Amino acid sequence: MCWPYLGYAHGGTFSVVLAASAFIAIGSSMIVPLWGAFVARVFGQERLGRVMGTMSVIVMVMGMIAPPLFGVVRDRAGSYEAAFLVYAALMAIAIVLLSRIKFTARPAVAAEESSAPIYAQKNA
């Protein structure tokens, strides 16, 4: 999902920037519901609240730092190209690192998979 940022860096035309923005919007909307499920699978459901809270603080701080940094890059380089290239490279690194994550928690079993109620399964 890092290639739309390359479109921002090298696009130039309205249609390229529009297409890159559309792909980023679609990707971002898919991430939101999957984020909690992914965190629960990696850290376990019992730690979901604590991990999501910590991640939210980190994401908020990074979200506050990024715009001024992009502005500094724009002021010094004369364009946003370098900032978007660095951002795309960081996303590519993150994608590689995500593939190395080991899942420690088992996925939750859906209630529909068994004909017996959950309380009966625990007491059996």
Image (spheres, rainbow, N blue to C red):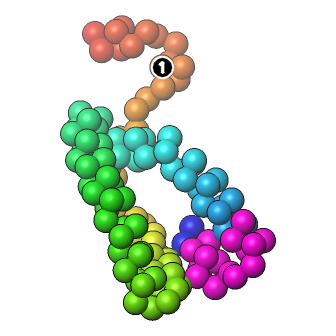
Q: Is residue 116 left or right of residue 100?
A: right
Q: Is residue 79 visible?
A: yes
Residue 56 rendering spot, x and y as whole percentages: 30, 47
Name the residue at 69% across, 82% down: 12
SS at badge 1: helix
Name the residue at 78% across, 71% down: 15
> Residue at the bottom extreme?
77
Q: Does residue 62 lie above or below 80 as drawn? A: above
Q: Is residue 84 left or right of residue 98?
A: right
Name the residue at 45% across, 82% down: 74
Where on the picture, by quarter, is residue 37? Answer: top left
Q: Main secondary structure of the magenta part?
A: helix
Instruction: Specify the segment rendered in magenta.
Output: 3-18
Name the residue nearer the viewer: 49 or 111: 49
Where on the picture, by quarter, is residue 61? Answer: bottom left
Disc 1 target residue? 111
Name the residue at 57% across, 48% down: 30
Q: Amino acid at mark 1?
A: Ala
Number of residues whose C-alpha sits closer than 10 Å to that of mark 1, classed few (under 14), some (14–19) or many (20 or more): few
Q: Does residue 111 lie above or below 119 as drawn? A: below
Q: Is residue 44 visible?
A: no
Name the residue nearer the viewer: 78 or 2: 78
